[in-house]
Amino acid sequence: MSDRRHKDLSGALRAALRGDVDFGTAARALHTMDASNYRRVPLGVVAPRDAADVAAALEVCRTHGVPVVPRGAGTSTAGQATGTGVVLDLTRHMRGILAVDPEARTAVVQPGVVLDELRAAVRPYGLTFGPDPSTHSRCTLGGMIGNNACGAHSVAWGTTADNVRALSVVTYGGGAERRLGHGWDGAPDGLAELVGGNLAAIRTGFPPGLPRRISGYALDALLPERGTDLARAFCGSEGTLGVVTEATVRLVKSPPARALAVLGYADESAAAEAASGLLPHGPLTVEGMAEDLVRDPAARTSLPRGGAWLFVETGGATPAEAWANAEALVRAADAVDARVVTDPAAQRTLWRVREDAAGTATRTPEGAEAWPGWEDCAVPPARLGPYLRDFRALLAAHGLRGTPYGHFGEGCVHARIDFDLVSAEGVRRFRRFSEELAGLVVAHGGSLSGEHGDGQARAELLPRMYGDELTDLFGRFKDLWDPDGGMNPGMLARPARLDENLRFDVLPREPVDVAFGYPQDGGDFATAVRRCVGVAKCRVAGPHQGAGVMCPSFRATGEEEHSTRGRARLLHEMLAGEVVRDGWRSPEVREALDLCLSCKGCRSDCPVGVDMATYKAEFLHHHYAGRLRPAAHYTMGGLPQWLRLAAPFARPLNTAARVRPLAAVAKRLAGIAPERDLPRLAPQTFTRWFRRRGTGAGDLLLWPDTFTNHLSPSVGRAAVAVLESAGLNPALPPGRVCCGLTYVSTGRLDRARTVMRRTLDTMEPLAGKPVVVLEPSCAAALRTDLPELLPDDPRARRLADSVRTFAQALEEYAPDWRPPRLDRPVAGQTHCHQHAVLGDAAERRLRARAGLTGTLAGGCCGLAGNFGFERGHYAVSLACAEDQLLPAVRAAAPGTELLADGFSCRTQLDQLAGRRGRHLAEVLAEGLGS
């Protein structure tokens, strides 16, 4: 489209709609991909406010001859949520729950409502929406209707189509909003005649005995003996017929109590063959997975013995009844081993193992990339065991690897496969395998798609499943609804080839010159960026996030560009150079990364381990190369240097900071938010205090990080007291050391490497001694940033491996020490870097031994080092704190100890809540009387 026509289209949409119209570079780049292997570049993005806006947008696009693709959370794995025209983002405004009728057990919703929001709204009535894909915390009802989504509980409650009562839709051809239900009302002209004239083909063309037949159009729902269910026939149409603007859905009674039976089997074939035999017991779920998807040792210990497992959930009116139902099922299961779990928290832990499989499976156990495309075929449940054996054999014949898992009770199998989708030969093999697998699925009486739809990945092969006559009927069905062909062209009817539009085609073939080593990605930044497969766990907001950290900026703004996925998409497009054309100088990428807190939450919470903090540092390093940086990069980014120079003048500087005009000038010059108070400098640094004590060499080293040394030396003094009470003899490094954190977080990577090498020179003579780091962010920098910035220096890995947190050091080197018994509740927050990089298991055990009860909040405090101090970040910093930390503190009972091991967390508590948080070392030292 020419620039003139492009401008005319965007102008016409703005004139016709009340909603948002964005044809900018960032919006287009953010919507080039979904969670599939495919990529299409849209002209622009429209976020309609209501059905009238949807109709107006379709009318404008039809007038201009521009296609439209409706989009929910963008988690589709077959490419159907991508398009070359206008993307309708239905998640921004059209996300209301319009009515709930507990007696009729129905709800009326808009298409952008998130599934978990609907489930939370109806939970007080003892009801739920039955289908629940593993993306339930972010997928939308409109997207579920478009794909006829299923999920783990479809064994009991069916697919989305089974739970839709009526739909309101708008079509590309214009006219009034159509209301679809049972009967022909709302049908396009000629549809009844099309079905009536082809009854024999429709009655015989769909494979029988398949609970998970998602492929193609559901023409059989229009048969008279099936009740002519027009709403059901619309489900699974992947946005190719029209746009859903409202849906009336069925709700089901949720059992008041549930139990989870985890059954262990020798291998996946044994688990698959056992699955269908459990169905007569009326389970709510029968999910299967094999041991090669359980890569977390802690998760492995929570499972019973076996090489594969079935997760079988049972319900009951009481916990005892649910448990009894699970025990009866275990007795009938003939499993190698079994475990019945009734505790809800323990159940959630086990379910997370299964739900994260969609991300875990994107890397093989050896670390190779694995991709969707052929990951939800379905066969009759009784055929699942033989099918899996044939599937494994086909993988081996093509030299491919993949790990099946999924809905074994319904014969639906997910498997990410290590296709080479970069080289021409790899893509040819992808096509050959796809064609042969389609034949294998059909030979077993199955469906090419059992959950995620056909999209571009499978629609080309629908004739192999349905034959030419029925496939031709699909095209005629599409044409009656969409005679102009404007709704999501290239999907289902007259589809694009499955090996076209691959998202890898546009990436550079040679590695990009970068500063970090990217050891998990072969040193290739493009490989690191394409880790993001779009499952969008970073888009989880509200109470559905749980104890995770990712992604605090998205939770604050709700904007896709502030999610981990959105930033990864922009970096992908930056490397592609088609939409984002300025490379490392891109203002769009800089703006999206500006609100990244570098919390590292995605490093642990993202199922595929995207590390946006590292990518941000890399980008800033290149973006500002040879250019003037923001003031904060020089001030807060160089904090170790400035604090060292300021230390002798701490008292007069503290006095000056209390003079408002002077403080205002200093903050303006330093790039600090005017709402922030300047931290108070310690009159005596921790290192000065320690060296005056005159201690000896020591058997472990206590790291004098910048924050402890200059801003909170009380933490260091308390740590010394506790370590010495435990029989340990701490010493300081013999010279000046720094982890380089502030330089890394501001992208001053050359300076960071200089500082790190100087630190390694100081530390190398003491190699082998444990290094206790009190500030979690500094410990994380030493564990990860140090070896990844200096991958060729073996000293970096040695120092990283020697790092211990305060609690880890006590547990490892003073295992018989008993902390003081404090017996009080705690509140506060686990530092985000501790959560993401270091883990807090030792801290939790130490708190328990000291009688400090309760759990700490998840999320990020919002200060995050320099982030919350920088001008322009205060509002987002406050919103992040209000997400979990501040509510947890306000809810704490009197006498509750506020714990915050990070200086940022303590500062945020002090400045926003007026409460003093303390490091665990300070609390324990007080208990010792020190």
Image (cartoon, rainbow, N blue to C red):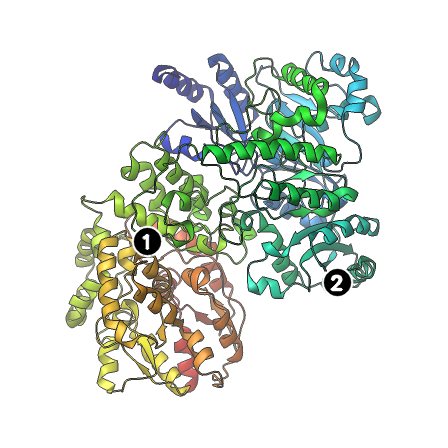
Taking 251 as reference, is 10 above or below it? Answer: above
For marks 1 and 2, give the CA distance.
Answer: 52 Å
| Amino acid, disc 1 | Phe
Q: Secondary structure at mark 1?
A: helix
Q: Secondary structure at mark 2?
A: loop
**Residue drawn at (69%, 52%), measured in percent from left and top?**
268
**Whole-percent x and y of residue 798?**
34, 68
**Whole-percent x and y of residue 189?**
69, 12
Nearer to us in this view, 541 or 213: 213
Quarter holding the N terminus is top left
User: In the figure, is residue 314 to the left or right of 302?
Assistant: right
**Residue drawn at (37%, 18%), measured in percent from left and top?**
7
Visible residue check, residue 903: no
Front: mark 1 or 2: 2
Q: Residues within 10 Å of mark 1 (few under 14, many from 20)?
A: many
On residue 336, the disc is 2
User: In the figure, is residue 701 to the left or right of 224?
Assistant: left
Per the image, the residue denoted by label 1 is 867
On residue 19, the disc is none
| Amino acid, disc 2 | Val
Quarter holding the C terminus is bottom left
